[in-house]
Image (cartoon, rainbow, N blue to C red):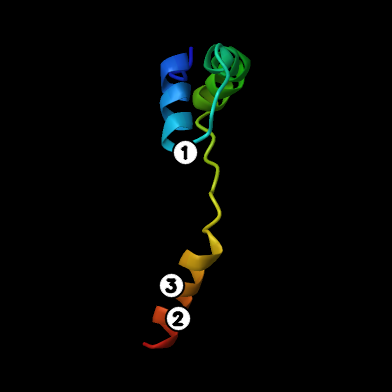
Amino acid sequence: MSDETAERIATIAAAAQVPLAPGAAERIARATAATIARFASEHVDIALETEPSTFMVVQRSELGR
């Protein structure tokens, strides 16, 4: 089973300032639980892209070396 609980979904949404309708956190947790559990059991590593502004900062610092 996944650690994606309705409480965790609601907390993440609140931190991102995304309003959720009553009951939406529970629906999201139920809808994503199976997929998240499959990814966790396979130990899938998904590389995340760096946001463009962070990339520019790193690129400029490397050019100055």
Q: Which residue is drawn at 59% across and 20% down?
A: 32
Q: Which of 6 and 1 is in front in this view?
A: 6
Across and down, in percent, residue 51 comes to: 53, 59
Which kind of residue does numbered mark 2 sit on?
Arg
* Spatial separation of the CA atoms under disc 1 and disc 2: 29 Å
At numbered mark 3, what does the secondary structure look like: helix, strand or loop?
Answer: helix
Of badges 1 and 2, nearer the viewer stands 1
Callout 2 crowding tier (Cα within 10 Å): few <14, some 14–19, many ≥20: few
Which kind of residue does numbered mark 1 sit on?
Ala
Q: Nearer the viewer, residue 53 or 47?
A: 53
**Left-right relation of 5 to 47:** left
Q: Which residue is drawn at 54% across and 16% down?
A: 29
Q: Which of 41 and 64 is in front in this view?
A: 64
Across and down, in percent, residue 12 comes to: 44, 31
Q: Which residue is drawn at 52% across and 40% down?
A: 45
Q: Quadrant of the C terminus?
A: bottom left
Which badge, 3 or 1, is on the more N-terminal residue?
1
Tell me the number on the disc at residue 58.
3
Vertical comparison of 17 with 65: above or below: above
At numbered mark 1, what does the secondary structure look like: helix, strand or loop?
Answer: loop
Residue at the spot of label 1: 16
Q: Which of 30 and 17 is in front in this view?
A: 17
The reply to whether dot 3 and dot 2 touch (C-beta < 8 Å) is yes
Which badge, 1 or 2, is on the more N-terminal residue?
1
Residue at the spot of label 2: 60
